[in-house]
Amino acid sequence: MAKLDELLVDVATLVESGQSNQMSLTVVVGGTVITGRLAPEAVWRQRVSEVLADSARLGEFSAVFTAPTRNDGPPTHLHFHLARILQGTVGIPETGGMYRVSIADVSAWTMGDFSYSDH
């Protein structure tokens, strides 16, 4: 197992402790660039649960995301809210998505989110 980036773990820990979704971050995971705001896991899970509950086809999965989280150590994942996958000059989805990324899979990162343009 690769050694986790301690600085990135510290950033994730601070987001978790502050219950804030204002920290913008851009990461590279498997060659894919994801940019957006980090959210505490509990906040992220609640929002995903709400989206699923509103779906006629996926409502039954909502309860999976409302289960209590286990806080038995430092964070192992980043939880993105209002995030986009950058592909060329396009951000997918346009409105932002909810992504969960393993910290162990992050090969590069920077503070802030990248803008993109269709100009």
Image (cartoon, rainbow, N blue to C red):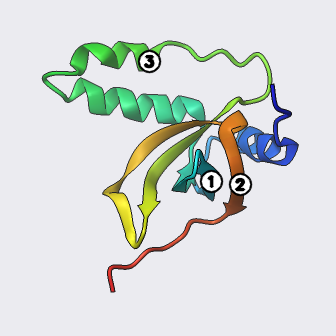
Count of marks placed on residues: 3
Label 2 sits on a secondary structure element that is strand
**Residue depicted at x 62% and y 57%:** 25
Instruction: Note whether 10 is above or below 48 in the view shown.
Output: below
Residue at image mark 2: 108
Identify the residue at horizontal 62%, vertical 53% (top origin).
Answer: 28
> Which of these two is toward me, 69 or 34?
34
Residue at x 38%, y 63% (from the top left corner)? 91
> What is the x, y in percent for residue 108?
71, 54
Q: Check disc 3 and report the residue beneath it.
A: 66
**Which quadrant of the figure has residue 110?**
bottom right
Residue highlighted by disc 1? 27
Q: Disc 2 or 3, which lies upstream in sequence? A: 3
Q: Is mark 1 on a helix, strand or loop?
A: strand
> Outermost residue, bottom direction?
119
Distance CA(mark 2)–CA(mark 1)? 6 Å
Q: Which residue lies furthest to the front in this view?
A: 31
Query: x and y percent of residue 55 in the render?
Result: 18, 28
User: What is the x, y in percent for residue 3?
Assistant: 86, 33
Amino acid type assigned to the residue bearing label 1 in the image: Val
Query: Which class describes the residues within 10 Å of circle 1: few (<14), some (14-19), or many (20+)?
Result: many
Does residue 85 appear to the left or right of 54 in the view shown? right
